[in-house]
Amino acid sequence: MALQGPEELGEQVEEPEDLDDQDASSISPAEEITLPPGPGGDEEPEEALLLPWDRFSTWLHCICVVGFDLELGQAVEVIYPHHSKLSEKEKTSICYLSFPDSNSGCLGDTQFCFRFRQGSNRKSSLGCFLENTDRDAPPCLKRDQGHYYGYVYFRQVRDKSLKRGYFQKSLVLISKLPYVTFFHSLLKIMAPEYFEKQEPCLEAACNDIDRWPTPHPGRILTLPIMGVVIKVRIPTCYDKPGTSQLVQSAQTDSQVSIVLPTIHEVDLFRCFYPVFFHIQMLWELVLLGEALVVMAPSPAESSDTVLALVSCISPLRYCSDFRPYFTIHDSEFKEYTTRTQAPPSVILGVTNPFFAKTLQHWPHIIRIGDMKQAGEMAKQMKVKKLKNLKTLDSKPGVYTAYKPYLNKDEEIIKQLQKGVQQKRPSPAQNAILRRYFLELTQSFIIPLERYVASLMPLQKSISPWKAPPQLRPFIQQDFMKTLEKAGPQLTSRLKGDWIGLYRHFLKSPNFDGWFRNRRREMTQKLEALHLEALCEEDLQERVQKHSEVETVDLVLKLKDKLSQAEREQLPVRPGTVAKLRAHIEAVILSLPEDLQGILHKPSTP
């Protein structure tokens, strides 16, 4: 049986080399779907069955307003929709994470994001529907099962009429979706309106969102909100990595106010600029799931940097915990700062000076200065020893004793430096850096893809009347042998200890998550091939050679296969499930009437 991994990866099992160049015959869903006029195109049949607030729930869990009370401190003042459920622990997390630390001195408007553990294991009534929309999403854009994201728009302005002398309030979107760019853009529209018109405006926004089409990967969606129309496309796992597929639709876009080229990507160059001499080492640390802390002057810089780190190994999913903004009030504070055991595999973003002392024992610390100075030339900085990090006021840089496995790539540093000197636009610098990380990750993962694909049994070994064959086990020594002829040297110019890097990676949470997904996906592929082989059999002829008891047993087994195919959404050819259903019906009708009545009854779960 497949191990239950957190999510599926989208690449095809038989074509691991396809990470870079897609087969000419494969069509991206962006090209495949022709959208009729109207918001988001035609409704899928299951979308027509959605109840009030179901559409809202596919995008957001709720919207919170967090204010500051002199008696209570931070407090959740409003939750929309009013029926939304949050535990007391979740409300406390949202309260503390929605305000910058007092030392950040964030006057005016500030946007950032945080991530916190889901307090209770509540199950959505939309479970099956959400799985369906999630299936085609890239690994990094699937719903977060155990955590919520909080997207914050915080306003702090002087107000002499208030005792503290300041107005302080945050509008917070709580969601399972990691669409950071999209939700920040949404808040830029909603928050200023809310601060001016208050609650009626929130109610109107929630009603707008509840009329949106669901966030289905591959579809171009037009999303009206408070008189503005946002146009987005959610990527799919079939898109060629590194490309944006927001196709301009044929109809006039006169109604569209904002077109977002990406829903989730942060500006990598701006985030890594203070430490860009060390980008390759940071890529290794993230790939290996090392404990990392980012110390920044504000939650905006802290959260952006953590999200940039997590995304630098894309299309590989970062499988450990990460907290874009983490405070001393966090419920995991003790767990993550204890000195009695090694730091966990997690990336933390912090702004409180207290952490400089509390996390001194952490092996890798990134100190980020003010990113507003990104126009100036970054100075060449050596990696600093951890003992030199005394306070949060220490100079920007990377504090670690880590020795990278790969030799430094001077080419990318020169290319980015040249861009700064020539005042190359920031989006172009960002594209160069994103492409660099993508090619580095692909060079690393292709040999693993190729080896794992070789563990798949041959199709001719699948017999309809025997259980599907098992995948062969992953044997580290066998994989290492393949690197000699088919290693990363085929696609990367970088030299260094690739073997050592793979050895370390195979012990990491990122490998464990990746392999579980691969294994589950390939096991489902075997189950699908087995189902297709069954459909090609002449079941009537087989039934004639067997007793009634054996025929009933066959029907029950076929019904199990059918429910598995529907439950797990097995990747079968179109029409296979309908064909199997027809086969089952034909076999039942060949039995005596009393048995037909029993077998036609729906099976209890």
Image: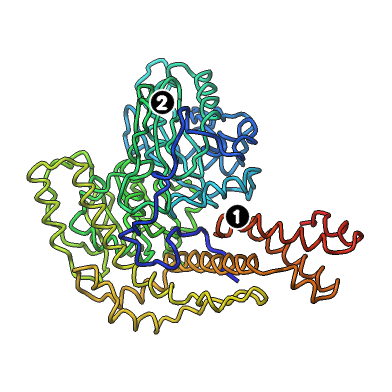
* Quarter of the rendering containing residue 229: top left
Position of the N terminus by quadrant: bottom right
The amino acid type found where label 1 is placed reads: Gly
Residue 373 falls left or right of residue 37: left
Residue 82 falls left or right of residue 278: right
Q: Return the residue at label 1.
A: 575
Residue 250 x, y percent position in the rendering:
36, 31
Q: Give the mark nearest the N terminus, 2 or 1.
A: 2
* Quarter of the rendering containing residue 196: top left
SS under mark 2:
strand
Residue 55 x, y percent position in the rendering:
57, 34
Taking the spot 61% from the left edge, 40% from the top edge, the residue there is 46
SS under mark 1:
loop
Taking the spot 64% from the left edge, 65% from the top edge, the residue there is 535
- Residue in front for this viewpoint, 329 or 169: 169
Query: Which colour assignment does the render follow?
Result: rainbow
Q: Residues within 10 Å of mark 1 (few under 14, many from 20)?
A: few
Residue 80 x, y percent position in the rendering:
57, 29
Q: Residues within 10 Å of mark 2 (few under 14, many from 20)?
A: some
The amino acid type found where label 2 is placed reads: Val
Q: Return the residue at label 2.
A: 229
Q: CA distance from mark 2 to mark 1?
A: 38 Å
- Residue 542 vertical placement versus 596 (above, below): below
Residue 603 falls left or right of residue 575: right
* Quarter of the rendering containing residue 495: bottom left
Q: Do the numbered discs 2 and 1 sit on residues whose CB atoms are within 8 Å?
A: no
